[in-house]
Image (cartoon, grey):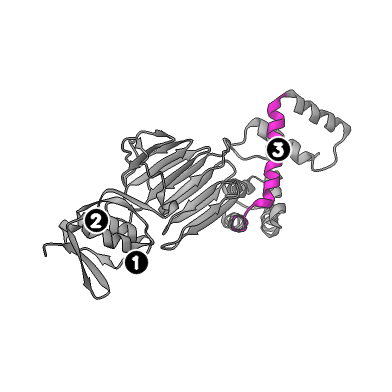
Amino acid sequence: MNPSPSYPAHASDVDQQALDWFARRQRAFTAAEEAAFHAWLQADPAHRAALDRWHGDWRQLDELPADGVAQLRRQLAADLAAEQRSSVPVSKGRRDWLAGLAAMAPRAALATVALSATGGGFLAWNRWQQQPLYAGNFRTQRGQQQDVTLPDGSMLRLDTDTRIAVALYRERREVRLLGGQAVFHVQGDPARPFEVLAGAVRVTVVGTRFSVRHTPEIPGAEEIRVQVEEGRVRVTGGAGSPVMELRAGQRIAADADGQLGLIGRVAEAGIAPWRDGRITFDNTPLAQVLAEFGRYGSTGLQVRDAEVAALRVTGTFDPQRLENFRRVLPRVLPVALRRDGAVTEIVANDK
């Protein structure tokens, strides 16, 4: 009789029973085993659910990304090396098992790990459980925007000079906003929450449309902003900051340490006017305005005078038509534009 397989330490008793039946059904059943199997299935609806989960895991073996397979192979090789270095005598059979596993085709290796009675193989099994089913990195250049559709159907719109890292796991979905801003239209899936990590802030959703901004490289604009257009999100800040829930039409900002401010209303311009080729400023220091324009391309503008840099700007502009901003600026602020070679300096108009 075949020995019952071992299981990961976190597996429940029902999961263990389901894996046992799953493994045994890979060979021909006797009539008695078939009857016992059906009796086990009918004893509790949780049995069928657990068995279905193992079937799902089996199907996902073929979907493991190439980098996940490579990492699994490295871990199997490391397990073998650790066994060989161990002060505890290692049987030839176990050495051969690990060496053979490392050389197998990915699906066969994973299946062997899942169904094997050799406990050490579950180091690799656990690592497979933690591998993303999909991983990708995306970056836009200055002046570029990009639409990204993820395998789960979620859609992302990346603004200029934006970097994200995406990882879709078996039980959760994660996007790291490393810099810039993006709009997220998340495909609902209650079993796999969608999270956006930006600095010290975590945004958790099930299905919604919202934007996140994280621009730590711009002085005065280091705060992390979350704005909701549709649905609801949960925003978790840094240590000691309360968890806040935002509904459609609401926004919140956090400082660089993740301390959340008060919930406010989304501006009339919407959660992401940049989608329509507009950037909006509301009583924003001129130095910060120039830095924002700089995210879309070289401006040729600079300001050296601290008092001029602190002047406030309100208005909506097209970042691709900087000449309009140049023309309007001396009309709305007490400044003049002074050409100095390839650079134009913004100076107080009394100098």
The residue under the point 34% across, 38% down is: 239
Q: Residue furthest top?
A: 43
The residue under the point 65% across, 31% down is: 13
Residue matched to label 2: 286
Q: Residue furthest right?
A: 31
Residue type at the position of mark 3? Leu
Q: Quadrant of residue 34?
A: top right
Q: Quadrant of the N terminus?
A: top right
Q: Nearer the viewer, residue 7 or 319?
A: 319
Dot 2 falls on a residue whose secondary structure is helix
The residue under the point 72% across, 53% down is: 108
Left or right of 238 in this view: 301: left
Please report the bounds of the magenta region as a residue range.
44-69
Q: Position of residue 203 (x, y in %)?
A: 44, 41
Query: How far apart are the alpha carbons under marks 3 and 2?
Result: 64 Å
| Marks 3 and 2 close (CB-CB < 8 Å) | no
Give the mark nearer the N terminus: 1 vs 3. Answer: 3
Residue 117 shows in this picture: no
Q: Nearer the viewer, residue 126 or 157?
A: 157
Give the mark nearer the N terminus: 3 vs 2. Answer: 3
Residue matched to label 3: 19
Give the mark nearer the N terminus: 2 vs 1. Answer: 2
The image shows residue 55, relative to residue 163, as above or below, that is: above
Q: Which mark is residue 212?
A: none
Residue matched to label 1: 298
The image shows residue 322, relative to residue 37, as above or below, that is: below
Dot 3 falls on a residue whose secondary structure is helix
Residue 201 inside the magenta-drawn segment: no
Residue 152 shows in this picture: yes
Q: Position of residue 163 (x, y in %)?
A: 44, 56
